[in-house]
Image (cartoon, helix red, strand yellow):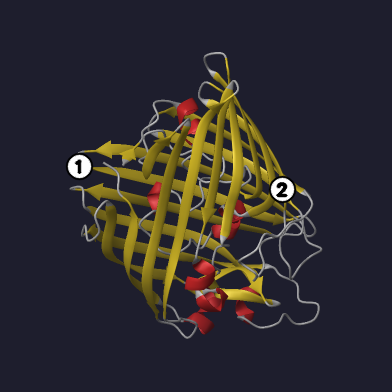
Amino acid sequence: MNQMHPKDFIQEIEHHAASGTSAEPASTPAPMLMTMKSVWMLMFHANAFVADTQQTSPRGGDKLFSTNWFMPMAEREWGPGQLTLRAMFSLEPATVTGERYPLLFQQGETAYGVPIADGQHPHNFFMEVAALYDLHVGDKGLVSLYVAPEGDPAIGPTAYPHRASALENPVGTLGHHQEDSTHIANDVVTLGATYGIARVEASGFHGREPDEHRWNFEQGKVDSWATRLTVQPGQNWSGQFSYARITSPEALFPGEDQERMTASLMCNRNVAHGNWASSAVWGRTRSIQDSAKENSYLLESTLQFKERNYAWIRLENAGRSNELLLGEHALPPAFREEPLTHVQAYTFGYDRDVNAIPNVSTAIGAQVTTYGVGRPLQPIYGTDPIAVQVFVRVRMKGK
């Protein structure tokens, strides 16, 4: 068992513990199993929840489900550089039934020809299958190549399932489809160049979002692109700005292309007997066809204290469209999606490790979310809905 802390930005990139080619602050803990086999360093990282959710509001729902992911990885020296082979899997196609778990005010993606409303879709079984190659150029330079039939292009911050600031929260963010929903994309190729504290990346990928078939690969031509600038001025800080043009991301609007911009700042600090990780994220999507825009804002922070205790907050202000008014029904003929209002979500949670399984971190916890409801949605949702989750969390334990 080990919990590795890279010493600088170059080492953080070569560590490859985050989603895709994104980078958290170098001081961010990444607990995982590690062993050496011949010339290969083998690693395994995982995070899983079994959660029960209860929601008020006429649109609310109750459900027992599991969100989870598992990441095996292998690294070795190969030629003049480092080769990394990495996969990421999720059993959510089996542990999240009905193609969704309840999440009030969430919208984005479709299932069987209708929009998913007030629910978060499960991740694909194949979240990532990727090969990465890193080549040092002088003392401060690094050139990197990322190739993934299923993977994460250079757009947005580290995706929410993998961010240290969100690692104790069992459910997705309301701003997911403005901020980091491309973390599962098809046929991704990314080239990156790093010098000192700065990194520039460019990606090509297939833009269509995953459909309801979550067990298979969904291949497609490289029709979209993204670019990202990441700056890491010290071990405790990391910031990024990214821009993407995404071709036909939504199945219900195949003729609509999107522009996406994101910016984020992450801070991590190792504290006595714990860790404190925080993220601030902005994301915006704009329809290329009619210039309709939606913005989402997020602030989240997780404090580990006295080794076994975790407390966190997630504050969101997310733009919602008029599609949410329809619920999970077929869109009317000639329906035109337009920005409608914003919704605020305020989440507070706590869990505590109980050490029920040797060498595994097992916690029991709960969180509660209250909402600020935009006026156009109040007749449907009411003015003060509440969501509560109780859960068990399991992941690798570092030392």
| Mark number, residue 10 | none
* Amino acid type of the residue tagged 1 in the rendering: His
Q: Residue at x 76, y 67 (%)?
A: 253
Asked whether the beta carbons under mark 2 and mark 1 sit within 8 Å of each other, the answer is no
Quick check: 34 above or below 113?
Answer: above
Q: Residue at x 72, y 48 (%)?
A: 205
Quick check: 92 above or below 57?
Answer: above
Instruction: Give residue 200's position: percent from left, percent from top.
Output: 62, 31
Q: Dot 2 surroundings within 10 Å: few (below 14), some, or many (20 or more)? A: many
Instruction: Give residue 282's position: percent from left, percent from top.
Output: 53, 49
Observer-nearest of 341 and 214: 214
Q: Quadrant of residue 240?
A: top right
Q: Quadrant of residue 310?
A: bottom left
> Pointer 2: what residue?
205
Q: Residue at x 38, y 75 (%)?
A: 53
Observer-nearest of 176 and 390: 390
Quick check: 142 above or below 153?
Answer: above
Is residue 252 at all visible to an observer of this figure? yes
* Amino acid type of the residue tagged 2 in the rendering: Phe
Instruction: Judge left or right: residue 264 versus residue 273.
Output: right
In the picture, the quarter occupied by the C terminus is top left
Instruction: Judge left or right: residue 255 versus residue 55.
Output: right
Q: Secondary structure at mark 1?
A: loop
* Disc with the residue nearer the chain's start (2 vs 1): 2
Report the residue that reaches farthest toward the front: 38
Q: Dot 1 surroundings within 10 Å: few (below 14), some, or many (20 or more)? A: few
Observer-nearest of 55 and 218: 218
**How far apart are the two marked residues, 2 and 1, measured between alpha carbons?**
42 Å
> Pointer 1: what residue?
273
Instruction: Give residue 101's position: percent from left, percent from top.
Output: 49, 74
Is residue 30 at all visible to an observer of this figure? no
